[in-house]
Image (cartoon, rainbow, N blue to C red):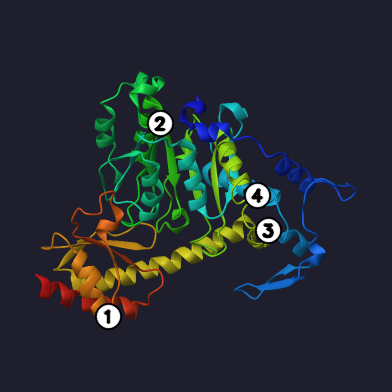
Amino acid sequence: MNYARFLTATSAARKPSAIRALADVVIKAPKSFISLAPGFPNPHTFPFKSAVITLENGSTIQFEEEIMRRALQYSATYGIPDLVSWLKQLQIKLHDPPNIHYPPSKGQMDLCVTSGSQDGLCKAFEMMINPGDNILLNEPVYSGTLQALKPLGCNIINVPSDEFGIIPNSLKEILSKWKPEDSKDPTKNTPKFLYTVPNGNNPTGYSLTSDRKQEIYKLARKYDFLIIEDDPYYFLQFNKPWAPTFLSMDTDGRVIRADSFSKILSSGLRVGFITGPQPLIERIALHIQISSLHTCTFSQFMVLQLLQQWGEEGFLAHIDRVIDFYRKQRDAMLAAADKWLSDLAEWHVPMAGMFLWIKIKGISNVLQLIEEKAIKKEILMVPGNAFYVDTSVPSPYFRASFSVVSPEQMDAAFQRLAQIIKESL
């Protein structure tokens, strides 16, 4: 693949930092190595000496003085080497990407730890988007994604979707305005990438089926665009077996995949990871070099020590426990919705994630109902217009999250909401 054609001039101009490169040498060097090069602060001057973190099962993670010195110091841009290695093995186990053993220049799978998945996504967007570029996504979409994309000046083309995700025939119709060979001509402005959240989409909770993914990937090959697979709810899929990912079918090296620990370990640690073809992951890493330098070392060590203690089996057992919790939360919200809203609204059962996307019948624009009337009754949801490129377009939808509220609170909230809807009809 010609990865150069996807890069902005700014991204293409990025060069490795000489100091950061030396820092990576020091980090991997044996103790006998004498370094006078990098400007690392002396860890003996740091006021933090040790820490013990107690886990839910009573076991502990120990930060003895030596580990603490490393955890408080600068670290490699791509991530702590042991953590990067662990995560690469996890990706191979879960997705078995076809491009694992490709030559780097041909799109070999690579991985970089990021400060939450959104940090990696923002850098991927900035790596590729010039003002006026065409990009594809399916509305409704996470508002944070829109906030990242819109200032870059791209043309956002909405691909229609339903409760099973993007509709391939609709994507095919949009792409039919171009010829496949137009991707080789910059003046034709063919779409650079398709962005999608394939599992438990925020806000809808909808998931893309395996058959549709395969059809979409074929179209990506035909029209030569990249796929950004933003999958923060991958580990919150309620039914097994989980659908194959775009990464698992990426024979070309055209998928950039963002994963997150925020929903399963901690949102505050800000540790995610982005996987994709080496030439593009390298560009993201070069951006990190001159922005944040690297993801928080202490957070990475917390995650690494936990994963090493658990092993892959322990990690996946934890995932099963998290899924069980959110499945019960989802079912409780569905029960409350059935009880109070069945005649007033409609919805589809979410197959992953932490959201229920509800359409109120008979009200074309719920903005005032959600932002004013509901708040006066001390309930808070997100109006649907927040998840569209044009937020001024009326929407009958709202998003309700079942992640942190109790079943009793869900019941009370929907009881109050039902009364508000009846009064507004």
Q: To which residue does mark 2 refer? A: 225
Q: Which mark is residue 412?
A: 1
Q: Are marks 1 and 4 in contact (CB under 8 Å)?
A: no
Residue type at mark 4?
Gly
Q: Residue at x 18, y 56 (%)?
A: 394
For label 3, the crowd category at 10 Å Cα-Cα, with few meaning under 14, some 14 to 19 and many 20 or more, is some
Say whether disc 1 or disc 4 marks the residue closer to the N-terminus.
4
Residue 78 point in image, percent of width and height: 64, 46
Residue type at mark 3?
Gln
Q: Quadrant of the C terminus?
A: bottom left
Considering the numbered disc 3 on the image, is that residue within a helix, a strand or a loop?
Answer: helix
Work out which residue is located at the far right of the displayed protein and give it. Answer: 32
Q: Are marks 3 and 4 in contact (CB under 8 Å)?
A: no
Residue 266 point in image, percent of width and height: 54, 65
Q: Residue at x 55, y 31 (%)?
A: 12
Residue type at mark 2?
Phe
Q: Are marks 2 and 4 in contact (CB under 8 Å)?
A: no
The image shows residue 324, relative to residue 118, as above or below, that is below
Say whether disc 2 or disc 3 marks the residue closer to the N-terminus.
2
Considering the numbered disc 4 on the image, is that residue within a helix, a strand or a loop?
Answer: loop
Q: To which residue does mark 4 refer? A: 79
Considering the numbered disc 1 on the image, is that residue within a helix, a strand or a loop?
Answer: helix
Q: Which mark is residue 256?
A: none
Say whether disc 3 or disc 4 marks the residue closer to the N-terminus.
4
Q: Nearer the viewer, mark 2 or mark 3?
A: 2
Find the distance from the CA under tag 1 to the CA under tag 4.
45 Å
Q: To which residue does mark 3 refer? A: 308
The image shows residue 155, relative to residue 362, as above or below, that is above
For label 1, the crowd category at 10 Å Cα-Cα, with few meaning under 14, some 14 to 19 and many 20 or more, is some
Q: Is residue 244 left or right of residue 163?
A: right
